[in-house]
Amino acid sequence: MTAIKAFLAFWYDFVVGDDWVAAVGVVAGVLLTAVLAHCGINAWWLLPVLVAVVFGISLRRAVRAP
C-alpha cells in the first residue's frame, strides 16, 4: 500500500469510523451552519442541536442492530 493510500485510509477510518450516518450528519450540520452564518443568520445554536439529533439517530441504529 502506498503512503498516499495509507494516509487516505487513515482519514476515512478516523472520520467515518463505524457509523457513516453520523459522519455525514455532522458534516452536513457544519456546512448548514456555515451557510446560515454566511447569510447573516445567527446560527451558533444549530450545530449542537444537530449533533444531539445525529447522536440519537446513531444510538437508535446501534441498539436495533443485531
Image (cartoon, grey):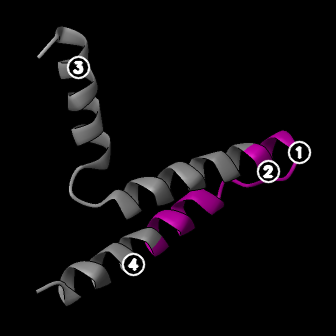
- Quadrant location of the N terminus? top left
Question: Going 52% across and 61% down the picture, which residue do you hit?
Answer: 48
Badge 1: how crowded within 10 Å, few (<14), some, or many (20+)?
few
Point out residue 17 in the picture as x, y percentages from the top left corner: 23, 50
Real-space CA distance between mark 2 and mark 4, rounded to the nearest whole angstrom: 23 Å
CA–CA distance in space, label 1 to label 3: 38 Å
> Foreground mark, 1 or 4?
4
What numbered label is drawn on residue 5?
3
- Answer yes or no: do the residues labelled 1 and 2 have beta carbons within 8 Å? yes
Which residue is painted at 68% across and 50% down in the image? 33
Q: Which dot marks residue 39?
A: 1
- Label 3 is placed on what type of residue? Lys
Chain-order first, disc 1 or disc 3: 3
Dot 2 lies on which element? Answer: helix
> Mark 2 or 4 closer to N-term?
2
Dot 4 or dot 3, earlier in sequence: 3
The amino acid sitting under disc 4 is Ile
Residue 43 percent across, percent down from the top left: 73, 55
The residue tagged 2 is 36
Residue 27: image x %, image y %?
51, 49
Mark 4 vs mark 3, CA separation in Å: 31 Å
Q: Residue furthest top?
A: 3
**Boundaries of the magenta span:** 35-53
How far apart are labels 1 and 2 at the CA level? Answer: 5 Å
Q: CA distance from mark 2 to mark 3?
A: 35 Å
Amino acid type of disc 1?
Cys
Residue 23 in magenta? no
Image coordinates of residue 60 in percent, x first then y, are: 30, 84
Residue tagged by mark 4? 57
Q: Nearer the viewer, residue 2 or 36?
A: 2
